[in-house]
C-alpha cells in the first residue's frame, strides 16, 4: 500500500465521479457551447456570490488571469512574501502582467490592514510603481494551511477599496478554510474583484480551476484565457468532475483536517522532528532535527512506500486528501515511528 502525502493534487476520480464524467453532455467550450462547462461556471459564480466565472485548466492560470485583468504594466501587487502567485507560478506576474510585487511578512501568511497601509505607493511619485491590487491567499500553502476569517477579509477589502485598490483571492483551498471558519462562500464575492478556486486539490477533481469575477471583467478574462492557451473544446467531461466535486466533496474536508492534525500531533512526539507548524487544515509542515536532512528522511519514507516532499532547507510537507484514509493514516504513523535519524 502506497501512502502518497505529497499533495492533495494526487487524488483520482471516485467511481461516482467517473460515472458523472462519462455521462456529461458536451459541446465546444471555446464557442461557449459546452453545456456542462456553462453549468459549472454558473454554479461557481452563484456559490461565491459573483456574476461570472471562467473555467480553466489550472489554478496557476486562473490566478495569472485574475492579476492580468486587474492590473496594467508597471503596476504593483501587494501580497504575502510566500504567496503562491509570487513564489510558485514560474515568475508569471512579471512575465504575464509586467507588474512588480510588494512582499509583506504577514502573520503566518495572513496580511493585515496595518501592514498594507504603509506599503501603498504615492501615485504622484514617478519613481514608484502604482499600487493596484491586494492579493490574498486562503488557505496559505506556505504556512501549513493557515486561513483568514471572513471578518478579516472584510476589513482588508474595505480598506483596499477606500484606497482605490482591487482585490484578488487565490482561493485554491478556500473550501478548506470555510470548513474551519463556518463562513458562507456566497459572502466572499462581496469583497473581491476576482477569485480563483481549484477543483483538483481537496475537492478531488482530476483537472480544473475556475476564475470567478465581476461580469464586466468576464470578456477580458476569456480573452486572456485564450491568449494563455487555456481555451478547451469538449471540456464538459472534465467540468462534470468539478460539478460532482462541489456537490459531494466539500462537507468531507474536515475528515482531511482531522487526519492532518493527528499526523501533526504524532510527529511532534518523535525525536528526529525539531518542530511542527500549527496544523489548521489539511497541510502539515515540520522541520527535521539538525542532525539529519529532509533528503535522508524522505529516502527512508520512500523505502517504506510513504511519499512526501521537501519544503525548505529542513522542512518536509505532508498533505491529506480524499485518497488518504484511516488505514493509510495508521501506516504513515507507524512508518514515522520507525525512522532513524
Image: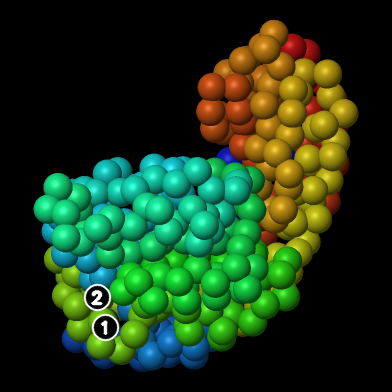
Determine the residue positioned at 83% across, 18% down: 271
In this picture, residue 327 sits left or right of residue 32: right
Rendered image quadrant of residue 11: bottom right
In this picture, residue 234 sits left or right of residue 17: left
Q: Residues within 10 Å of mark 2 (few under 14, many from 20)?
A: many
* Residue 173 in view of the camera: no
Residue 181, image x and y in percent? 71, 70
Determine the residue positioned at 69% across, 21% down: 288
* Residue 174 in view of the camera: yes
Q: How is the image coloured?
A: rainbow
Which quarter of the rendered picture does the N terminus lie within? Answer: top right
Residue 197, image x and y in percent? 47, 69
In this picture, residue 187 sits left or right of residue 269: left
Looking at the image, residue 96 lies above or below residue 332: below
Residue 277, image x and y in percent? 70, 39
Looking at the image, residue 130 lies above or below residue 165: above
Residue receiving disc 2: 221
**In contact (CB < 8 Å): disc 1 and disc 2:** yes
Determine the residue positioned at 40% across, 53% down: 118
Residue 8, image x and y in percent? 58, 52
Q: Give whichever of 54, 30 is nearer the camera.
A: 54
Residue receiving disc 1: 218
User: Marks 1 and 2, Cα distance to the nearest angstrom?
Assistant: 5 Å
Q: Residues within 10 Å of mark 1 (few under 14, many from 20)?
A: some
Which quarter of the rendered picture does the C terminus lie within? Answer: top right
Rendered image quadrant of residue 71: bottom left
Q: How many callouts does the rendering have?
A: 2
In this picture, residue 166 sits left or right of residue 50: left
Determine the residue positioned at 26% across, 82% down: 217
Amino acid at each position: 500500500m502506497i501512502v502518497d502525502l505529497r499533495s492533495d493534487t494526487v487524488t483520482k476520480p471516485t467511481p461516482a465521479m467517473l460515472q458523472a464524467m462519462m455521462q456529461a453532455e458536451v459541446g465546444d467550450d471555446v464557442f461557449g457551447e459546452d453545456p456542462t462547462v456553462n453549468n459549472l461556471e454558473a454554479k461557481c459564480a452563484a456559490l461565491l456570490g459573483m456574476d461570472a466565472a471562467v473555467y480553466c485548466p489550472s489554478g496557476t492560470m486562473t490566478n495569472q488571469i485574475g492579476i492580468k485583468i486587474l492590473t496594467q504594466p508597471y503596476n504593483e501587487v501587494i501580497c504575502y512574501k510566500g504567496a503562491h502567485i509570487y513564489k510558485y507560478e514560474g515568475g508569471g506576474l512579471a512575465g504575464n502582467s509586467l507588474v512588480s510585487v510588494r512582499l509583506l511578512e504577514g502573520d503566518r501568511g495572513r496580511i493585515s490592514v496595518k501592514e498594507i497601509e504603509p506599503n501603498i505607493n504615492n501615485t504622484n511619485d514617478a519613481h514608484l510603481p502604482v499600487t493596484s491590487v491586494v492579493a490574498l491567499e486562503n488557505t496559505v500553502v506556505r504556512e501549513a494551511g493557515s486561513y483568514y476569517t471572513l471578518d478579516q477579509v472584510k476589513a482588508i477589502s474595505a480598506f483596499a477599496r477606500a484606497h482605490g485598490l482591487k482585490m484578488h483571492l487565490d482561493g485554491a483551498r478556500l473550501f478548506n478554510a470555510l470548513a474551519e471558519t463556518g463562513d458562507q462562500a456566497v459572502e466572499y464575492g462581496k469583497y473581491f474583484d476576482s477569485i480563483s478556486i481549484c477543483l483538483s486539490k481537496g475537492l478531488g477533481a482530476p483537472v480544473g480551476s475556475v476564475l470567478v469575477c465581476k461580469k464586466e471583467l468576464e470578456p477580458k478574462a476569456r480573452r486572456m484565457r485564450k491568449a494563455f492557451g487555456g481555451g478547451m473544446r469538449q471540456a464538459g467531461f472534465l467540468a462534470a468532475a468539478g460539478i460532482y466535486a462541489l456537490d459531494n466533496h466539500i462537507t468531507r474536508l474536515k475528515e482531511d483536517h482531522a487526519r492532518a492534525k493527528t499526523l501533526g500531533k504524532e510527529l511532534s512526539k518523535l525525536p528526529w522532528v525539531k518542530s511542527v507548524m500549527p496544523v489548521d487544515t489539511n497541510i502539515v509542515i515540520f522541520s527535521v532535527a539538525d542532525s539529519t536532512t529532509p533528503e535522508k528522511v524522505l529516502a527512508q519514507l520512500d523505502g517504506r512506500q510513504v511519499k512526501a516532499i521537501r519544503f525548505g532547507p529542513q522542512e518536509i510537507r505532508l498533505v491529506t486528501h480524499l485518497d488518504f484514509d484511516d488505514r493509510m493514516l495508521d501506516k504513515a504513523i507507524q512508518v514515522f515511528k520507525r525512522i532513524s535519524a
